Image: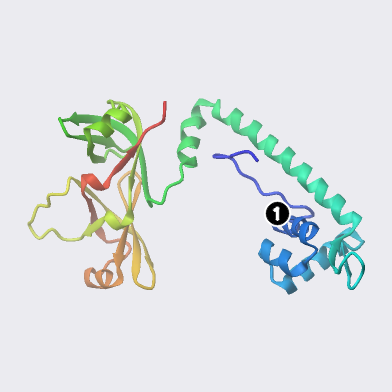
Amino acid sequence: MRDASILTGELKVAGRLDGRFFALLEALDSTASLRKSASAAGYSYKGAWMVLEAAGALAHEPLIQSSTGESGGGGTRLTHAARALLQAWQLLQQRHEAFLGDQESWLLQQPVFAGILRRFSMKTSARNQFTGSISAVETGPVTAQATMTLPGGQEITASMTAAAAKKLALKKGQAAIALIKSSAVVLVTDFAGYTLSARNQLAGTISRVEKGAVSSLIGLTLPGGAVVTASVTNDAVAALGLAVGQDATAVFKAYAVMLAVAAK
């Protein structure tokens, strides 16, 4: 199967029969056990029966046949029609993967889309992912600091080892992505005359408060449209009175920032 990092697509037959249904047929063909096949494909036993009956109605002929106590052993087996349908699906999948591969290759040749699509394809657990360009690099004997400027003009500074900076070959003007976990972001609504040591302090307006059982996700929209997400305990949300429309500052240390650049 093609390792698609940018384009994906879901195939359905007759608008209803998807990959899970055909996984059920494939498992049935191997095990002749509806119960085992249903579990493998993520159906309940009853749900598997229902989807097979519905598919048989669409095909106007049964897709399974059950037997008990025969010389070949009992069980639920695919009919010739079901095997033909499964084979057609497998060939269709191959053609679909080839099609997506061709379209992805074409997209990556388009200068306007290539960089954006590659950034979209990056998969990481960090909730905050910002794109920008390196505006300054300071390298010492042991550690290094790199500053990335966002499209809105804000700056994010990352601290790393000198070896890491050398490996990334960081240079001014280079496109980069900054990754920050939401748990590393502290929201400040009132500095009360104090100055914090954290290098990164981004002021914005709270645009989202999504409460969970224990903690909440707070979205802070910066000038220019970028959104910083912070994970805050519900107690802290109540204590600070965090609400949509409120001004706040997202604070996080430079060592909490991970930089990513395109591999050469």
Of residues 187 and 252, the one nearer the viewer is: 252
**In this picture, residue 129 sits left or right of residue 57:** left
Q: Amino acid at mark 1?
A: Gly
Please name the residue shown 42% across and 47% down the image: 124
For the image shown, how many numbered marks are present on the structure? 1
SS at mark 1 in the image: helix
**In this picture, residue 14 sits left or right of residue 131:** right
- Quadrant in which residue 177 is drawn: top left
| Looking at the image, residue 126 lies above or below residue 50 | above
Quickly name the residue at label 1: 19
| Image coloring type | rainbow
Please name the residue shown 38% across and 73% down the image: 213
The location of residue 43, given as percent across then percent down, is 69, 67
Of residues 11 and 226, the one nearer the viewer is: 11
The location of residue 21, given as percent across then percent down, is 74, 59
Please name the residue shown 22% across and 36% down the image: 161
Of residues 139 and 215, the one nearer the viewer is: 139
| Looking at the image, residue 92 lies above or below residue 249 | above
Screen quadrant of the N terminus: top right
Residue furthest to the front in view is 71
**In this picture, residue 219 sits left or right of residue 187:** right
The location of residue 204, given as percent across then percent down, is 27, 52
- Quadrant in which residue 245 is drawn: bottom left
Please name the residue shown 22% across and 44% down the image: 254
